[in-house]
Amino acid sequence: MTIYEVAQRVGVSIATVSRVVRGHGEVARETRRRVLEAVEELQFRPSRLGQSLAEGRHAANGIVFPDLSGPYYAEVILGYEELAADLGSSVLILATHGRTDPDRKVLDLARRVDGMAIMGRTVSDGVVAQVAATGMPTVLLGRPPIGELDTVTTENDASAREMVTHLLGHGYRRFAYLGDPAESSDVTARYDAFRAALVGGGIRPPRAPLRCAFDVPAGQEAAQRALARPPRPQVLVCANDEVALGALAAAQQMGLSVPDDVAIVGWDDVMAARYAGLTTVRQPMRELGATAARWLQERMAGSRFHARREVLQTQLVIRTSCGRHSVDREDS
């Protein structure tokens, strides 16, 4: 059944039916009653798309990600999309990695959605401010706050320091860091905390990170370079679990035992890390995405909250890749 058939049954315009269904606008009580009766009798169910078009909306929100590959981004997107779907919105996803002129693509997306979530260092602060200046509801995740925009991130500093303290407790003194802090504000925070914790423990930190992309092949290649340099590092601290999984593969390829010859730690606690026995920091990845989706929906509905800042807690997970422990010290 369509809105036209409801209007014909009652003898009113489709605009009147639309106002009754949406609950907006003035409609006489008797007319409203008759329209609702016809809606029930005809089992009319208005489409969300049709309602959105009538209200000048798109029935969708957008999320801008650095990349769509890898388990970390997949988990965040799942959390975001599931919550958005529960709230009645579809999601348009834009990944900026490898795209020419990502700024223009983000601005183009902003014209096709009702709100936008922007993750990480996908576009400059200037582009984010340009999107927000149009009045577009905007939420940031995994990047520093900008202006009065809602921002949700995960904790990096305390967990990185806790990890280093645990590694120092094993007696390790030679460290290498794999990953590029310049590519992620989260990784920047982890790397800075890693260095500060080493200094606080009386250990000279590495002069620079071994910069690499955040995937398994890049981690494997960076680990091979690190492990080939004398004196060989005792620990490879990796920017994320994919880099760490690549490092595990490199150690195996070079005939090195983990953790006896080299310890390896990561960050995120993706599913593969659990099967690999990887010590890492567990992030609430789905909660990160769901929080951004919920906040964006509230902004799109016209909420007038002050700018919100939330830091979701992380947890160090001790497994076998960082050293030998008693059984009760290892976490699943």
Image (tube, rainbow, N blue to C red):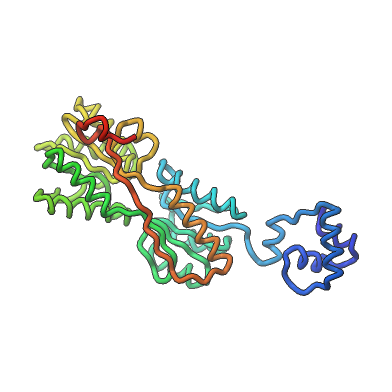
- Establish if 235 lies above or below 161: above
Judge whether residue 122 can be spotted in this image. Answer: no
If the image is split into quadrants, where does the C terminus sit? top left
> Closer to the camera, 75 or 178?
75
Residue 29: give x, y in percent of width and height.
Answer: 83, 71
Is residue 43 rendered to the left or right of residue 160? Answer: right
Q: Is residue 33 above or below residue 239?
A: below
The residue positioned farthest toward the front in the image shown: 328
For residue 190, side relative to residue 304 (left or right): left
Please name the residue shown 32% across and 54% down the image.
Answer: 155
> Residue 103 versus residue 88: which sits nearer the camera?
88
Q: Quadrant of residue 308?
A: bottom left
Figure quadrant of residue 231: top left
The residue located at (68%, 66%) in the rendering is: 55
Where residue 52 appears, x then y in whole percent?
A: 67, 61
Q: Name the residue nearer the viewer: 190 or 326.
A: 326
How far across and down, in percent of the image, does residue 165 sit? 18, 46
> Residue 319 location, x and y as percent?
28, 34
Residue 17 visible, this orientation: yes
Vertical position of residue 157 compared to residue 270: above or below: below
- The residue at 55%/60% (across/down) is 297
At horizontal 48% and vertical 72% (from top left) the residue drawn is: 133
